[in-house]
Image (tube, rainbow, N blue to C red):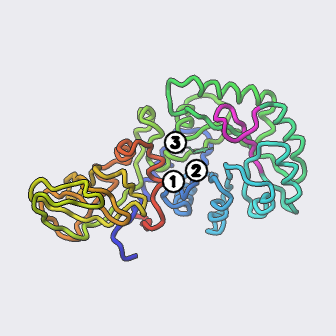
Amino acid sequence: MFRPSRIEIDRAAIAHNIKELTKRIPQDIMAVVKANAYGHGAVEVAKIALQNGATMLGVALLEEAIELRDAGIMAPILVMEAQFPQYAGIAAERDITLSVFSAEWVKEAAAYIEEKPLTVHIKVDTGMGRLGLRTREQLDALLEEATDSFVVEGIYTHFATADELDSDLYYTQQERFERLMEGIHERFRYIHTSNSAGAIRMAGQDVPYNLVRVGIAIYGLYPSHEMETFYSFLRPAFTLKSQLMQVKRLEAGQTISYGATYTTSADEWIGTVPVGYADGWLRKASGFEVEVNGFRCPIVGRVCMDRFMIRLPEEFPVGTDVTLIGGSVAIDELASYLGTINYEIVCQFTSRLPRHYV
Ligand SMILES: Cc1ncc(COP(=O)(O)O)c(C=O)c1O
């Protein structure tokens, strides 16, 4: 790579986060590495997570599971998004666990499974309104259908509001799940309900669940501001860095970038940073600040496809480091500037930005 712009992933931070989580959470930990490990690099993160206490991996897509298998990762992998039944045989062959949610799906999938049975976890919808069966009748019908070609290893649900401490829905979902599970806990090797927020909230409680699916916390980020009270041990692993490519002095009255939305009000030092919206550094970030030599420098004018301009407090040499995320610029600060959540920020950067593991 010739460009100076890169995402740096702090391996030690991920290892630290997993270790600290395993100390506090009594259940087994599934490291959720979908979406290229929330932009951090799926294969790398999966390896670090497994070396530091995670026992299972969670992804959204069969493609993501196959990428991990192709990289030689042999740990159990659960695909959490629905897959079409005709791909059941491919998943079985690669020892990939699928999420199932209806007797019809199971019946159809059986035709595609050959020698090796397919391991499945049943997905229950207790309030997300997303994927999953909703009644005990549907569960019983599925269990009846899932015979020889299937190993029914787990059952799970997903909370919509685990990160909101005053939400009643969180408790309602737990009740619905427990009602559905009445008398059949023993049938499953794994029963799981919690994401990062739920895992930490349940840490001290006696619950009949033995696995948690932890995503955002592995990356050192908080599921919500409210959850920061529980998560003081986390360390963010993601930084985005570049370097000044051009530095110039513009006199008062000069315009900058498309639309000429910024005009210098005096003599100003302007630096060009080679990261743009094609990298995932959104156009809406115009006006946000990045860090150069310990100074917070505002983005002036519109962010372009491949670069943006900043106002420097003084002349800095070409090649000076620019920190877009990291240092004093927290992901949560950028998220709130852009009106979104940290999850979306880390997922938005494209493959044009190389990931360096440090
Ligand atoms: C089903 C499921 N479980 C667990 C997670 C991990 O959630 P978090 O990143 O909040 O820990 C996700 C992520 O969206 C998910 O979809």
Instruction: Residue under label 1, please give it.
Output: 38
Residue 34 makes an appearance in the image? yes
Residue 19 makes an appearance in the image? no
Disc 3 vs disc 1: which is toward the camera?
Answer: 1
For label 1, count other residues whose C-alpha is less than 10 Å away and answer few (under 14), some (14-19) or many (20+).
many
Q: Are the residues tagged 2 and 1 within 8 Å (C-beta)?
A: yes
Quadrant location of the N terminus in the rendered image: bottom left
Local secondary structure at mark 3: helix
* Amino acid of disc 1: Tyr
Instruction: Residue under label 2, please give it.
Output: 32
Q: Which mark is residue 11?
A: none
Instruction: Decide whether residue 129 is among the magenta residues.
Output: yes
**Residue in view at x 25 percent, y 58 percent:** 260
- Asked whether mark 1 lies closer than 8 Å to ligand 1, one says yes
The span picked out in magenta is 120-134
Q: Give me the C-alpha separation between circle 2 and circle 1.
A: 9 Å
Residue 331 position, x and y percent, is 38, 48
**Is residue 315 shown above or below 60?**
below
Q: Give me the C-alpha separation between circle 3 and circle 2.
A: 18 Å
> Within the image, what quadrant is residue 230 found in?
top left
Local secondary structure at mark 1: helix
